Amino acid sequence: MASKDTATSQLSGLAKRLVSDAILQEHQALEAYQYAKKNKIPFVTHLVQNGMANSRAIATVASDEFGTPLLDLSVFDTQLLPKDLVDARLIRNLHALPLFKRGNRLNVAVSDPTNLQALDEFKFNTGITTEAILVEEAKLASAIEKFLDEAEDTLGDLDDADLENLDIADDTENKGDDDDASGADEAPIVRFVNKILLDAIKTGASDIHFEPYEKRYRIRCRTDGVLHEVANPPSNLAPRLAARLKVMSRMDISERRVPQDGRIKMKLSRQRAIDFRVNTLPTLWGEKVVLRILDPSSAKMGIEALGYEADQQEMYLKALAQPQGMILVTGPTGSGKTVSLYTGLNILNTAERNISTAEDPVEINLEGINQVHVNHKVGLGFAEALRSFLRQDPDVVMVGEIRDLETAEIAIKAAQTGHLVLSTLHTNSAPETLTRLRNMGVPAFNIATSVSMIIAQRLARRLCEHCKKPAEIPHDTLLAEGFTDDMLNGAEIFTHGDGCSQCFNGYKGRVGVYEVVTVTPEIQRIIMEEGNSLEIAKKAKEEGFRNLRVSGLMKAAQGITSLEEVNRVTKD
């Protein structure tokens, strides 16, 4: 009997509870526990894989035993998973799945709350504090399998044959026919161009520049908003490289005197394809070709991944839920305005709504939304498209950019007549947006009654979690930069490291920095009185809306970005 008691004492709290709740017999629990321990697999995984207990019953008991909330993993959007944070092999070996990162805490899905090894390993590999979230074993196994399938079904290591035979949309429809065409079809050129495109995708670049000069040829990629050189092929290859890119994007390869526009669609796997928007420009030493990488997955990131603070996110969602009004997103080119708008459209994209967009050009295809490519050559501008939208029973309208008074007036009319309008303007801050509309000629009354929210934004580079290091900055200097004691309370300011295998120059990825301003009655009053942007900014600050600078400093205080980055992308 003593031997039996000794054996039973080897059981964990969960195993004992499963026995006491009659889900397992005592000898079953002991054998399963010992087998799992010997083979270094989670106890719960072994039970479910061998049909010894129901996945839902185990999760319910575990939740009650350890006081841990139970998450239904089937309703979690797998697109939100932090795919680049943890190696896929670690996820497979530990049988746990990182779900999302909030602040400096990584939430990890586990089916066995006693699987502390997984939490420790993730913490060691990411440098982030981990917290367990309990899920059902069957759903966890399914989610991990799907995650690993997607991870393995992407780029991988491609050999020369793969590079030569990448699945690219039919390129036989090129219009020209000259000596360069045959050169462009040579296998070495094909492999080289494909490798440049694939490497750019792997490193998360947003643009690729092919640039000819008198004695050299330069290829640069814009990664995390900064250009860097990636290759220097011989300058005599310039015509053949340009011809190959023009063939791929269905341009006229015989025309070198005028700029051209085209697109490339590259299929990377069964589930993922990347579009490139291509533009050529005749320069002194040949054609410069720039490719903008359009990844459809960026439009489905989910609002949680964009970097809004909790109160800013709540304000944006509240504005999107309104049946009418105008939401304006502002910032320079490359500040992430399109992703913010597409994220909002994805939230609104339901079977009950009719959504139409006018874009120049349409960058990413969104299923369920009527997207119009503006074509000024045939007289289809933003104003003409918007005017047509209003005759097609719209609920939500998105205008790529308000550039003139005519477009502004139609958009405002739509916002005042029961439609939700989303658009962009090129201004530096939210208050300046309101005065810009007035300078266009829009009456102050129409601005005050139609514009419901302005979002000004920038993109700052994220610090690499693997090599970032504490910044030794005196407290007084931090206060002079704009930090407050509340921000610095318990916070540690970091700077970028020297770079590692996980990042580029100490940074990896980007995060949005936002100024979200709701047009309140007090701000409406200032607009009606034709107050300037300084008066609007002062009132917005009094009402608790943070400007770009303060939002950026908050990101630095959270350890997400560095003070250098905040200084680079924001100004007082």
Image (spheres, rainbow, N blue to C red):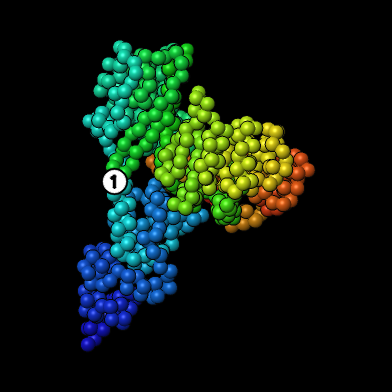
Q: Residue at x 68, y 32 (%)?
A: 440
Q: Is residue 404 left or right of residue 247?
A: right
Residue for badge 1: 152
- Residue 81 rendering spot, x and y as whole percentages: 40, 52
Residue 298 appears in the figure:
no
Q: Name the image quarter holding the N terminus.
A: bottom left
Q: Residue at x 45, y 35 (%)?
A: 363
Would you identify the image quadrant in which residue 57 lies? bottom left
Q: Residue at x 56, y 43 (%)?
A: 422
Would you identify the image quadrant in which residue 267 lies? top left
Q: Which three-letter amino acid code belongs to the residue tagged 1? A: Glu
Q: Secondary structure at mark 1?
A: helix
- Residue 423 rendering spot, x and y as whole percentages: 57, 40
**How many marks are shown on the rendered structure?**
1
Q: Residue 323, relative to residue 235: is it above or below?
A: below
Residue 345 appears in the figure:
yes
Q: Residue 80, relative to residue 109: is it above or below?
A: above
Q: Name the image quarter holding the C terminus.
A: top right
- 439 and 469: which is toward the camera: 439
- 59 and 386: which is toward the camera: 386
